[in-house]
Image (cartoon, rainbow, N blue to C red):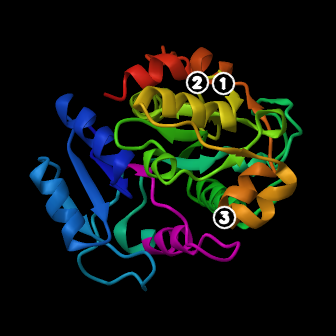
Amino acid sequence: MTHKVIFGCGYLGRRVAQAELQDGASVTGIVRTQASVATLQMAGIPARILDLDAALPTVDIPDLQGTELYYFAPPPRQGVAETRVGRLIAGFARTGQPRRVVYLSTTGVYGDCAGDWVDETRPAHPQVDRARRRWDGEQQFRAWSRSTGGQLVVLRVAGIYGPDKLPLARLERGEPTVQESEAPFTNRIHVDDLVQVCRAAMARGGDGEIYNASDGCPGNMTDYFNRVADWAGLPRPPQISLADAGSRLSAGMLSYLQESRRLDSRKLQRELGVKLRYPDLQSGLAGCR
């Protein structure tokens, strides 16, 4: 069985690694700190340190020749270039070329779609820097694939939720959200389903293909916060007008409010054969205990 390497072996990566190990695969998780290495090792996941914000060292780089590489690492916090991906691809000359890459991108590359349904044929139009960085990462891996023949599958992932990944602290602080009539459409996927999707993409995703990774059941942002609050037994957040949001919400939250789209994920289920355990928020929250 081909060795699997997971760059950015955090919330999602640990779960993918454990699923691969349970099926008898050989796995290495790549993280940035010794503390993260210790966390993975306690979970029985072999781990190595590599900081993609630094020049790649000439020693201690995992042998990547012929591996299957999951790239889950976040992009840099600033700018529009995905410099971490660039350094990794440059390093392949020393580490060897992976056989196949599954790259975790974002549905943010579509930009604002005014609430339209969006499938994978929709042209990318990233409008904020966090999405432009992911788009740049997609382009760099595509150039790598063209030049080396390495296989690439791109997952454009909606908001990830699951155990220990819900906006509970925000709700406990009583932070407001926009009134439901003005709230944009948002999309999400439970982490357990995303694990399935990532592994299916590695096993049988079409080379060069893009898949929207979402449960296919969009809602609006305010409804999401309300339903999480109800599930957790917390007060629902106060609602404010979109006009007032500029002075009361964070820049990050405001950027999400400026985009609205509904994701069509039928290609994922049709071509990858994934049957979602949590096809909507109600079932997904029940799976967060």
Say which mark, if any, is on residue 250.
3
Residue occupying image coordinates x 18% and y 30%: 22
Residue type at the position of mark 3: Ser
Q: Is residue 10 above or below residue 133?
A: above
Crowd band around label 1 with a 10 angstrom C-alpha radius: few (<14), some (14–19), many (20+):
some
Image quarter where the C terminus lies is top left
Q: CA distance from mark 2 to mark 1?
A: 7 Å
Total numbered labels? 3
Crowd band around label 3 with a 10 angstrom C-alpha radius: few (<14), some (14–19), many (20+):
few
Does residue 97 show up?
A: yes
**Residue identified by numbered label 1:** 265
Q: Are marks 3 and 1 in contact (CB under 8 Å)?
A: no
**Residue identified by numbered label 2:** 215
The residues colored magenta run 67-91
Q: Earlier in the sequence, mark 3 or mark 1?
A: 3
Closer to the camera: disc 2 or disc 1? 2
